[in-house]
Amino acid sequence: MCDSCGCNVTSGNRHLAYKPVKAGTSAVSVLKKLLAHNDDQAAHNRAHFDARGILTINLMSSPGSGKTALLEATIDALKDEFGLAVIEGDLETENDAARIRARGVPAHQITTGSACHLDAHMVHEALHQLDLSGVDILFVENVGNLVCPASFDLGQHRNVTLLSVTEGDDKPAKYPVMFRAADAVVLSKVDLLPVLDDFDPARAELCLRQLASTVPLLPVSARKGQGMTAWYDWLRSELAAQRARVALGKTAKPFIQLDGASLHAHAEVSV
Amino acid sequence: MHELAVCQALVAQSIDIAQQHAALGVAVIRLHIGPLSGVEPALLQSAFPLAAAGTLAAAAQLVITPQPVRVRCKTCGADSEATPNRLLCGVCGDYHTQLVSGDEMLLVNLELIT
Ligand SMILES: Nc1nc2c(ncn2[C@@H]2O[C@H](COP(=O)(O)OP(=O)(O)OP(=O)(O)O)[C@@H](O)[C@H]2O)c(=O)[nH]1
Ligand SMILES: [Zn+2]
Ligand SMILES: [Zn+2]
Ligand SMILES: [Zn+2]
Ligand SMILES: [Zn+2]
């Protein structure tokens, strides 16, 4: 085992580690997650949040699924109960951050240019420009995209994936990586269900369960206020869980990474 | 398309390791990629030369071994093969399963020119 190059050889992967190679070359087994640099920064971000007792939630969905509308309604309902702040990720424009600030909550906009996702470094820069004093829940609205955002740990504690009823009920089957990363799935714009004849919420749930996901599926309409109580209760219970963890000096990553780390014989396990 | 970002991380890591071993260059980079990792092997292959250009890894061969999707059933305990969007137990059909393999995105092995 070579500590200096960060390799992580266990009985489960030793067969990969030392292979005969051509003269003039030497095998160096590394077994690192490709995004280790991002993951290190994410761990640092998470330490910032935990030091302040903040719960950080990453919102992901297709463009236009209703992330900002969900945040606006949540701010109106909860801003007297909790300190809230938002980091917005968008390709261009400050529009979403302006919508949040109009509700009286601090927001920082990250404009990614052409990047289709946020990464931990972008979030770190945003953190140092946001006043986090008195903040209980920090929302990160990721770039609208069902592919890339699922691959980057930002330092958040929980992932929420939105599926709007205008997108089709088979989205979880088409984007399994994204939906498997969710700690809760919000079925948004349910006020439109009566005018859509082909979206079956039961089929959407079946597609989600076929990904072995047992997380809550919360049907809401941010516009009409339907189902929002269950969403607020989920947030309250997650904040309580975060406070309990912080009191014990513990932290949490989104569900998916824990699952993988504990089961894969050769996965790098980081705390 | 985040494969370029992944490739840049991959090249940076490989170069770090090459430098720690005082290598002249990187000959081979071996990866394990599962279909549930969120990266496409073909896109990684095409992004790699771009990310590696002008570095110690510029001439490296990128070898990607796809990993199978396997689940372990929490209900009956069986291990079985699955597909990326049907992670059900192959024995009893239950959805209370955990992924045993299929989401890995690992830099497994490097061959360095020394
Ligand atoms: N009928 C209905 N429309 C909604 C609801 N929530 C959002 N919308 C509409 O859907 C459109 C997009 O909503 P946004 O909240 O901007 O969506 P977003 O996910 O933040 O979009 P991006 O940041 O661009 O990815 C807007 O026209 C909203 O008014 C809802 O509950 N019901
Ligand atoms: Zn938005
Ligand atoms: Zn910092
Ligand atoms: Zn992309
Ligand atoms: Zn079973």
Image: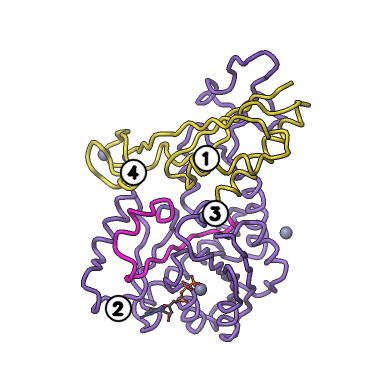
Give the structural element (helix, strand or loop) at label 2. Answer: helix
Look at the image and give the residue range highlighted in magenta.
A154-179
Identify the residue under disc 2. A192
Q: Which is in the foreground here, disc 4 or disc 3? A: 4
Identify the residue under disc 4. B97
Identify the residue under disc 3. A252
Marks 1 and 4 in Cβ contact (< 8 Å): no
The amino acid type found where label 4 is placed reads Thr
The amino acid type found where label 1 is placed reads Met
The amino acid type found where label 2 is placed reads Leu
Between the residue at mark 1 and the residue at mark 4, the CA separation in whole angstroms equals 20 Å
The amino acid type found where label 3 is placed reads Ala
Is label 2's Cβ within 8 Å of ligand 1?
Answer: yes
Q: Which is in the foreground here, disc 1 or disc 4? A: 1
Identify the residue under disc 1. B105
Judging depth in this view, the residue of A230 and A264 nearest the camera is A264
Is label 3's Cβ within 8 Å of ligand 3?
Answer: no
Report the side of B17 relative to A182 (left or right). right
Judging depth in this view, the residue of A132 and A107 nearest the camera is A107
- Note the chain letter of the yellow one: B
